[in-house]
Amino acid sequence: MDNNQPYDCAIVGGGLAGLCLSIQLAQKNFRVVLIEKNTYPFHKVCGEYISMESWDFLENLGLSLSRMNLPQIRKLHVTAQNGFQIASPLDLGGFGISRYTLDFELSKLSKTVGVVVLEQCKVQSVVLQDDLYVVETSQGKMNARIVCGAYGKIDPAFMERENANKEGGYVAVKYHLKTDFPADLIELHNFKDGYCGISKVDHDTFCMCYLTTVKNLQDNNNDIKTLEKNILRKNPALDRYFSSATFLYDKPLAISKIGFQKKQAYRQDMLMLGDAAGAIAPLCGNGMSIGMCASKILAHYITDFLHGKISKQELIKRYTNEWNANFSMRIKTGFYLQKLFGKRLTTLWALKFLGRSPRILRKIISLTHGQKFS
């Protein structure tokens, strides 16, 4: 590691938002370092449905999605806890791809375009000294002109001020499985205090991912299998999958203490994107697309800053304004939908109303999908 020459940009976190930002900046010949605590490829707890709004962006970035034979998802089914179901087309639609595949392919692309990717590396502190950042990591110290946080839903240890007195109330669990399921369909199944999504990804595999409250897990002896037996399988649609599908993990991936508190796009002297800028509820639609779109917006303003066209304060102001303009409504929609889901009677009544009001249902779906960008 060159400790003398400062990087133009250091990115903390190598998920979709961080990887896409690193590639765009490196393609503009900036010196970029991306710091990731894991080693690619690895699985992540994620629903793995991505809105078609992101397709052209990823293709233009250099990722040939069209050659991957990915499932194109055009239909939505939603069930209440008792199995009552409504259906709707997805006007924009999406595609399925595992984070294991997508993040790995983007990490290879980032290295190809010149990003310095530090894997198995943890950030210990980020300190702004005059006009230069000092980033201390488990692999050494480096300097950077700008630092961006793209570390996901859970703040890392060095964000101590952010972690103080804050604990999330949700847990997320993910499986990959084999089952008999249409490739063009995504399903959302409600259960007590939670919901579960199922859709196809790459390699003839299906993603099952659910979100519920920490309390729900605690009430079931903090045991995922007990939770699934006592709560999820009360929904007959979910019971069918747990009874008949082939589960590909010995045990599921899980993360806990997830919160959906309002955050800021600039905190502790760092520009934030993706879930680090505001943990995105799954029902807001396509948190992955939001993270990638934010990377495009931020890459533009960082480029202007590094070329001396705008000041750092102007960079912060413009990015924050665009973040709010582009994503605040989608995040709010997801937040309110999340409050609606997982309630036995409220969810059932809402679904029966929406089942008789297809135009309203499609309007709500459109609020969770953005416009295509490239």
Image: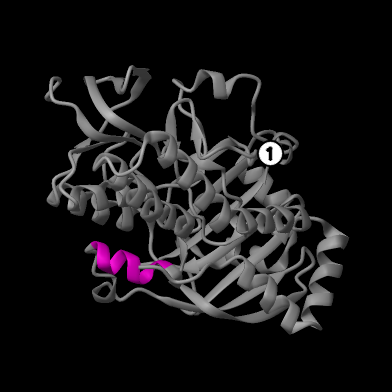
Q: Reply above or below: 331 against 264.
A: below
Where is residue 305? Give x, y as percent.
Answer: 31, 41
* Residue 194 left/right relative to 126: right
Q: Residue at x 72, y 38 (%)?
A: 220
Where is residue 25? Give x, y as percent.
Answer: 24, 48
Q: Foreground residue, 238 or 165? A: 165
Q: Quadrant of residue 188?
A: bottom right
* Disc 1, SS: helix
Question: In the picture, which quadrant includes the C terminus?
Answer: bottom left
* Residue 148 left/right relative to 325: left
Q: Quadrant of residue 293?
A: bottom left
Circle 1 residue: 217
- Report the span colored magenta: 54-61
Q: Residue at x 49, y 35 (%)?
A: 266
Q: Reply above or below: 255 against 17.
A: above
Question: In the picture, which quadrant includes the N terminus?
Answer: top left
**Magenta segment: does it hold 311?**
no
Mark 1 burial class by Cα count in 10 Å: few <14, some 14-19, many 20+: many
Where is residue 112? Give x, y as percent.
Answer: 13, 51
**Coloring scheme used:** one colour
Q: Residue at x 33, y 49 (%)?
A: 299
Where is residue 18? Give x, y as percent.
Answer: 35, 45
* Numbered disc total: 1
**Label 1 is placed on what type of residue?**
Leu
Q: Foreground residue, 5 or 104? A: 5
Residue 116 visible within the image: yes
Q: Residue at x 68, y 76 (%)?
A: 363
Residue 251 visible within the image: no
Q: Main secondary structure of the magenta part?
A: helix
* Residue 91 left/right relative to 72: right
